[in-house]
Image (cartoon, rainbow, N blue to C red):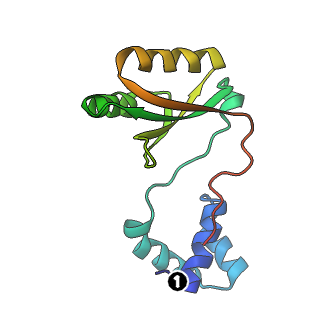
Amino acid sequence: MLSEKDKIIFNHLRKNARINLTDIAKITGIPASTIYDRVRSNEKCIVKKHTTLLDFAKLGYNAKAKIALKVNPEDRKRLFDFLSTCKNVNSMYRINYGYDFLVEVIFPGIVDVEDFINSIESNFKIKEKHVFNVIDEIKREEFII
């Protein structure tokens, strides 16, 4: 469990991972050395990775979809391996309620998403799928402790 100071520090880092620790100290009144120590001591156990969120549309990737897949058990490992190495899969989750995977894919256009889905269906025994095309990203990576 995080202390209140840790929560304050990590909330600032969640909002802007590039914020200078001295700036957090000025905002919060917590000494910079304490912030540094708290970040370092928690980094190995709660920080998965430092990353940058990109605006894919500005890079020419205008189609984003979330795809829930249920596959025959004998194809599960092969599909997992395929999805894990596919460069257009941005995120991948193992899920429940009758499905095996939820993947977020990003492509230049919706036709590319359809081609990807057709490729999966022709190479794996997909029992069920649900495709959700993302129209607009309203909120992402903003959960604050």
Q: Which residue is mark 1?
A: 34
Location of residue 6 (image quadrant): bottom right
Location of residue 25 (image quadrant): bottom right
Is residue 14 shown left or right of residue 51? right
**Amino acid type, mark 1:** Thr
Determine the residue positioned at 65% across, 74% down. 24
Q: Nearer the viewer, residue 37 or 77?
A: 77
Residue 32 lies, in percent from the top left, at 58, 79
Location of residue 141 (image quadrant): bottom right
Residue 33 lies, in percent from the top left, at 52, 81
Q: Nearer the viewer, residue 137 or 130?
A: 130
Residue 109 seen anywhere in this rendered image of the structure = no
Q: Tag 1: Cα neighbours inside 10 Å, few (<14), some, or many (≥20)?
A: some
Is residue 40 shown above or below 75?
Answer: below
Determine the residue positioned at 24% across, 30% down. 74
Determine the residue positioned at 63% across, 63% down. 143
State the residue lying farthest toward the left. Answer: 74
Residue 73 seen anywhere in this rendered image of the structure = yes
Determine the residue positioned at 75% across, 38% down. 136
Is residue 33 shown left or right of residue 75? right
Q: Nearer the viewer, residue 25 or 1?
A: 1
Quadrant where the C terminus sits is bottom right
